[in-house]
Image (cartoon, rainbow, N blue to C red):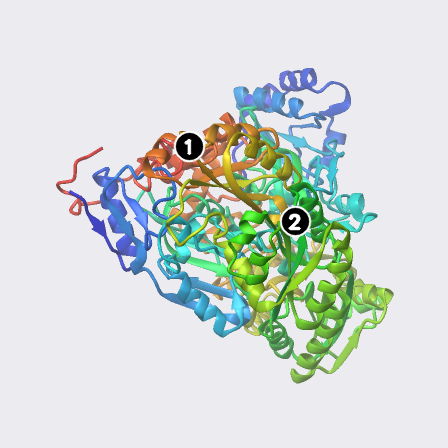
Amino acid sequence: MTEQFDPTTPEETRAIVADALASKTPLEIIGTGSRRGLGRPPETAHTLNLAGLSSVSLYEPDELVMRAGPGTPMDRIRMQLDQHGQMLAFEPPDYGPLLGRTAGEGTIGGILAGNLAGPRRIKAGAARDHFLGVEAVSGRGELFKSGGRVVKNVTGYDLCKLMAGSWGTLGAMTEVTVKVLPAPEKTRTVLIASPDATPAVAAMNRALSSPHDVSAAAWLPAKATARSGVSYVAGAQTALAAVRVEGIGASVDARCAALREELMEFGEIEELHTHNSVALWREIRDVRLLEDGDAGTGTGVVWRISLPPKAAPRLLEDLQAALDMDAFMDWGGGLIWARVTGMTDAGSYVIRRTLAGCGGHATLIRADMETRRSVPVFQPEARGVERLTRNIKEAFDPHGILNPGRMYEGV
Amino acid sequence: MRMPDPDSDVLSRRGEIIAALRRIVPGEGVIAEEEELRAYECDGLTAYRQLPMIVVLPETTEQVSEILKYCHGDGIKIVPRGAGTSLSGGALPLEDGITLGLGKFNRILDIDYANRCITAQPGVTNLAITHAVQADGFYYAPDPSSQIACSIGGNVAENSGGVHCLKYGLTANNLLGIEMVLMDGEIVRLGGKHLDAGGYDLLGIVTGSEGLLGVITEVTVRILRSPATARALLIGFPSSESAGNCVAEIIGAGIIPGGMEMMDKPAIHAAEAFVNAGYPMDAEALLIVELDGPEVEVDELIGRVETIAHENQAKSVRVSTSEDERMNFWAGRKAAFPAVGRISPDYYCMDGTIPRHRLSQVLTRMNELSGHYDLRVANVFHAGDGNLHPLILYDANKPGELEKAEGFGAEILKLCVEVGGVLTGEHGVGVEKRDLMGEMFTEIDLNQQQRVKCAFDPTQQLNPGKVFPTLHRCAELGRVHIQSGQTRFPDIPRF
């Protein structure tokens, strides 16, 4: 027998979790379920669906703050922010199509629970950096809150940091407060023909170390550029480093000109205007350049690897020598997206062993359920850190009621 | 301020503990003479003082680990201390505790331009981080007022801010990794030179944990390229309302200034008398707005801000035309605390944050309270992010006046919470605001925070008596209270 619970208030959510605790029945927590296939397979058939907690209860553009239920669709949040020329600056991605679902399904709670962020991460931070306040139900069946509605706040422990990236294993969120920021008036992208990874990362580092306030930097190998819907990029027939500049019109023009000058030595240079820039960075954000064809038709597993940017070219080279792999870089080299085919362990052993040399973490973003059961989806932790992780889980959810095992076995 | 009762057994073993520490840290690294201990009796919050039992100044991570391992086994409490600049008593010693000072951890370990970060020992000052990379055109963004003295390890413990927070973030947003020693001596690394955590964001929870979770022994932070240019506007307003409206409209127009500071009339007058910055003496409120970035952008935005200022009844607007003039605009603001120190024997610095649109309401109420307590107050305000620093003027030599100032301060912080704000924006809870935590949090909230403390330090030997108003034992906090009728899950098989 499986049950789904659909609370519409924080108190109902609390009562359901308290009942689950009393009967020691674990719950899978979902919003729309758009990222349900991410993580270790659920260890329970019962779901707590938070889609009913879906209203924006506070939005004050002048105060740069928004408060909403976790089930509020991202599309609705984007629309509301758009009306006031604002945005979530961490550029929340939409992995729907990558995970074989449709685009536009995700919720704000899901984005925060996964601490997801797009290309602007290197300038503006991740979801965690914009997460000001939370109310959630712990696995103890208690409604707790942390943080507030103001940016500057060091009152008590910042439990938002733990809620972000814990994938629902510590609390079922019932209300979230986030910082919002003005959206840029204009966007341009400087493209540098850059066939090899090492000079590409050097070029991106030059751009990111310049005073020109670069908001994103990615390197797309020729296979990736060929898949772009932006005709100039697709027609380039070479690998490209892409550097994004955003802001007010005159400033964007001046900075682009300066960057072209500064990056000239790295390769031939072109420029994308606002419309094409937005389209290209959305493809990068949503990881649409790793495979041919339509949503959900791709094969192979997909990895997301965060690492020191300088180490990226070497790591990529080592992985490509050992694996059948398609990849591109974001975050100036600090993030590698890789699609791996034909490995029984999804390439986990090779990827993590290679990564150990430079530090960082690899997460299996897409794989079938059998693979996610047998391969560590999240980066295995060092012994001391692992102990802390288990203690933290124990502190919030001692009986393993909330998404048990989603991240690590027994957590 | 009531601190945990001293453990007489530990006190009686003082000599033996000193000997044990000297075996771990040879030479002058163990301080036991009262005269020398005196230097450690308080931090930046001088109203509270306590002589530590012993001070130890280790030089290596291994020594820190050995000290903690020894203290863990012997039930001895530890108070970590950086530069001792906390304004909330975060490093206030314990009578039966060892103050563990990290002043000898003062080396920059690695400057890594290819990964745009720098690794330093925790005792390096905030400003020294910037100095290490300045010649190459880089800087470290968070800039607390005490940056010349405060340590980077202390910045992590307090999640320090500064005037550039709105645009560039707090310590938490600029921190990449730490090495930390847990109470039982285990050395762990959180983060590194990459972004975000592979599992739980333990680095995020340690940031701002006020020395209760571990002792930080190494810090890696992001460095940024210095902006091409910076210019400032100095704007005088006839009322704090018009100044507040101007701030809201600047942000509403999509402009995020590098810094945006407000001062009220008493603060303007104190500062002007101190540094002659040329502040408008007839203004009720003064706004310093600094725009930084590419030159053409700064020029454009200066014009936009000027227009908004005039639309909001600005009585005077000056735009800096040189670096000297910009620094001069800031001189008064940066000297505001010592300037207030000149017009009053003592002052008490508060640190609440409020939603910005409640500013005039809060200032009005604060004036009423000022009358009620018969104590003057001057206000400086990080206007962009709503962080308010009321300075309460008092004379500690007058009997009862410190208590009156504390009472006034507590009322101000309660008011901040009442209008939707928080008790502390950047100075920390420490001992100072510990007993006010109940104004903002329920017992359930506080217990949940304290369970995080238990996850790192189950024996609660690290900096006890700070942050949490009531010290529950971890075993007690760990108990699960089942409060349900089990109606929803009658037939579901148990696991």
Nearest to the observer: residue B473 or residue A69: A69
Q: Is residue B192 visible?
A: yes
Is B365 in front, or is B353? B353
Question: Disc 1 and disc 2: Cα gap in Å?
Answer: 45 Å
> Label 1 is found on which chain of the structure?
A
Instruction: Tell me the quarter of the picture where residue B449 sits.
Output: top left
**Horizontal arrangement in the rendering, residue A280 relative to residue B52 (left or right):** left
Q: Residues within 10 Å of mark 1 (few under 14, many from 20)?
A: many
Callout count: 2
- Residue A193: % across, % down: 67, 52
Depth check: A87 or B174 in front?
A87
Q: Which residue is outermost to the left?
A: B491
* Residue with the mark numbered 1: A376
* Picture coordinates of residue B265, whole percent (x, y): 71, 73
Image quadrant in which the C terminus of chain B is located: top left
Q: Is residue A188 above or below residue B491?
A: below
Q: Is residue A222 left or right of residue A116?
A: right
Question: Secondary structure under badge 1?
Answer: loop
Point out the frontmost of discs 1 and 2: 1
Res B293 visible:
no
Q: Quadrant of the N terminus of chain B?
A: top right
User: Height in image: A116 above or below B180?
Assistant: below
Q: Position of residue A276 (x, y in %)?
A: 57, 65
Q: Amino acid at mark 1?
A: Pro
For disc 2, the marked residue is B87
Q: In the rendered structure, the residue with mark 2 lies on which chain?
A: B
Which of A144 and B415 lies nearest the eye of the viewer? A144
Q: Is residue A276 above or below residue B139?
A: below
Amino acid at dot 2: Leu
